[in-house]
Structure formats: C-alpha cells, structure tokens
Image: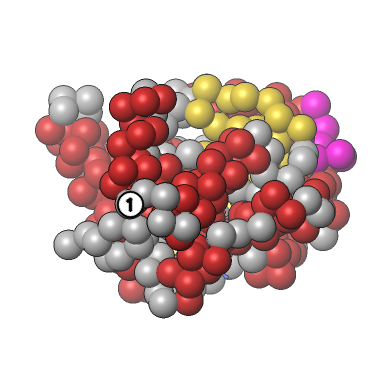
Amino acid sequence: MSADSIRTVAVLGAGTMGNGIAHVFARSGYRVLLRDIDKNFLDRALDTISKNLDREVAKQKITATEKSTALARIQPVTDNVALVAADFVVEAVPEQLDLKIRILKDVDSVVGPGVVLASNTSSISITQLAAHTGRPDRFIGMHFMNPVPVMALVEVIRGIATSDATFAATTALCEKLGKTAVAVNDSPGFVSNRVLMPLINEAAFAVMEGVATPESVDTVMKLGMNHPMGPLQLADFIGLDVCVEILDVLLRGFGDPKYRACPLLRKYVAAGWLGRKSGRGFYTYS
Ligand code: NAD
C-alpha cells in the first residue's frame, strides 16, 4: 500500500477528533466515509466541519467553492458495510480499550487485506491494539493533535510489528495532508501525552491544594513560560475525562504513582464537568 493509491479514507468516530480528521482529509481531496453510531452525531459533526471550513474561507485559505467540494466529499455512515470502499482507516472512537478492540476487529473483517488501520489513540499501546487484528504489520498509530485542521503535528507510532511499508505510507499521507509526521516508538502516552499530562495533572493539584486559582496557574504558564495556552485551559479543551483516561493508562503502563490523576480532575469528571464540550470544566463556557 502506497500513499498514492489512497483515495477513500474511513474515519471511525465523528467526535472532537474524528470531525477534524475528516475535515483535513476532505480538504486535501480524499473521499471520506465518516462513521458514527447515531445520525445525530454525524449531523453535528458535519455542522462543525462546515463552520470550521467557513473560518478557512473567511481567512481566504480556501474558496467558498472549495469548501462545498470538500464537504461533499464526506459521506456520513452509521454501519460498517460502506467501509468496504475504504483504502485507509483512521480510528477515533473514545479512549476505551475494550471499545477500540471491538470496533477495530469489526472493521478488520470488512476492509480489504491491504488496507492500513491507523489509531488516533492518545495513549493505548499500538502493539496491543494491532494484536487484536489480523494485520499487525498494517497497523499503526496516527496521533493527530486537537484542533486537527489547525495543528501541524502528527505523532506516527510504530507498533512492534508495524511494517516499513505501513510506516512509509502513513508518513507520506501526513505530508499530503500538510502535516509534519514525527516518528515515535510505542510506549505509554507516546511523547506528547507523557510530557503534557503530568503538567496538566500538576496544575490541577496546585488548584486543589489552594496554591492558586485556575486563572493564576494558567497566567503563570502563559506569561512566565511563553505557553500559548495555560495547562488548565488546554485540559478543558482536550476534555477532562480524556485527561483522566490518559493518566490512568500512564499509571498502569509505568506503574509509577507520579501519574496518579488528581482527585479534583476525577471529581470534575464525576460531576459531568468535562471542560469546553460540556460547558464547564476549570472554566465556564457559554
Ligand atoms: P469524542 O468522545 O469526542 O468522540 C468519539 C466519537 O466516537 C463519538 O462521536 C462517539 O459517538 C463515537 N463512537 C462511539 N462508538 C462508536 C462506534 N462503535 N463506531 C463509530 N463511532 C463510535 O472523543 P475524541 O476526543 O474525539 O477522542 C477520540 C480519540 O482521539 C480517543 O482515542 C482520544 O484519546 C484521541 N485523541 C483525543 C484528543 C483530544 O484532544 N480530544 C487529541 C488526540 C487524540
């Protein structure tokens, strides 16, 4: 499988990441099969993609015609049958091991034998996910950053059995999307979340212990360390539930208590304060 032969890409999950991934593939000329479990989720995703493409039109990055053409390339689907047409698959369903395994097994049995399965997991082992499919050599991590249309990086993660051809096709595909691929070996949290999540966690501990308010913690990091966004603002953006899930994976993967999720993060998640997507996290959103 070479990147040049890829025309149709299946994106599994139309949430925060899935709609961004569908957006960049469609804008780069690929036909996209966007799969979710419910038509309402797909309608919402297409609405988000349309609004995000509007922003690019307003910034004169694309024309209104290019926007409509890109949007028309995305076909929403609620079952796996349509995925048979896919040349490449990117999985972006919630960060739950059992769910990912079930979905990847199902898709593995539907798509052609040469098709590469890529997971956008933030922290689950690529080697482990690959082992549940019949194609561990054609399985790889393709970790896009949020918001996908804006962020230049894709961490490309090789599992133990990932072939050189799969790695080459995936990095070439990233380039076609205008992204920079960085090769990373399979290890809990890869590089991005192994470094980022302890920062977010420590910021949450500082708030829980009354060291400073969320605004103050974020201001220290923005003005003092030149971070474009404070860690708690970023946590709200990522989703506090996603942060806790990733910290749990790091804790299990390394067995090191330094990755223990801050109780305040868990409390917010239990309250349904998931960050920007639920309207409230460390900050409130209208
Ligand atoms: P999300 O909850 O916003 O979206 C997940 C979507 O998957 C939902 O729309 C859900 O309905 C759908 N889904 C559930 N079961 C499905 C099934 N059987 N078939 C198809 N779709 C199904 O989650 P997200 O934030 O987009 O995260 C998705 C993945 O991307 C996770 O692995 C996460 O770790 C990773 N990730 C997230 C971020 C981030 O900032 N949010 C960044 C990088 C990577």
Whether 190 is drawn above or below 213: the answer is above
Tell whether circle 1 marks a residue whose Cβ is less than 8 angstroms from ligand 1. Answer: no
Residue for point 21% across, 33% down: 56
Residue 159 picture quarter:
top right
Whether 121 is drawn above or below 170: the answer is below
Magenta stretch holds residue 69: no
Q: Is residue 280 left or right of residue 182?
A: left
Residue at mark 1: 213
- Out of 268 and 30, give the one closest to the viewer: 268
- Out of 41 and 66, give the one closest to the viewer: 41
Q: Is residue 193 visible?
A: yes
| SS under mark 1 | loop
Whether 78 is drawn above or below 220: the answer is below
Q: Is residue 281 left or right of residue 57?
A: right
- Out of 226 and 95, give the one closest to the viewer: 226
Disc 1 residue type (three-letter): Thr
Q: Is residue 280 left or right of residue 261?
A: left
Quadrant that contains the C terminus: bottom left
Q: Position of residue 69 (x, y in %)?
A: 27, 40
Q: Position of residue 164 (x, y in %)?
A: 80, 26
Per the rendered image, the range of residues in magenta is 158-164
Residue 223 picture quarter:
top left
Residue for point 77% across, 39% down: 186
Quadrant that contains the N terminus: top right
* Dominant SS in magenta: loop
Residue for point 81% across, 54% down: 255
Q: Is residue 117 visible?
A: no
Q: Is residue 178 left or right of residue 102?
A: left
Whether 159 is drawn above or below 252: the answer is above
Residue for point 47% across, 57% down: 209
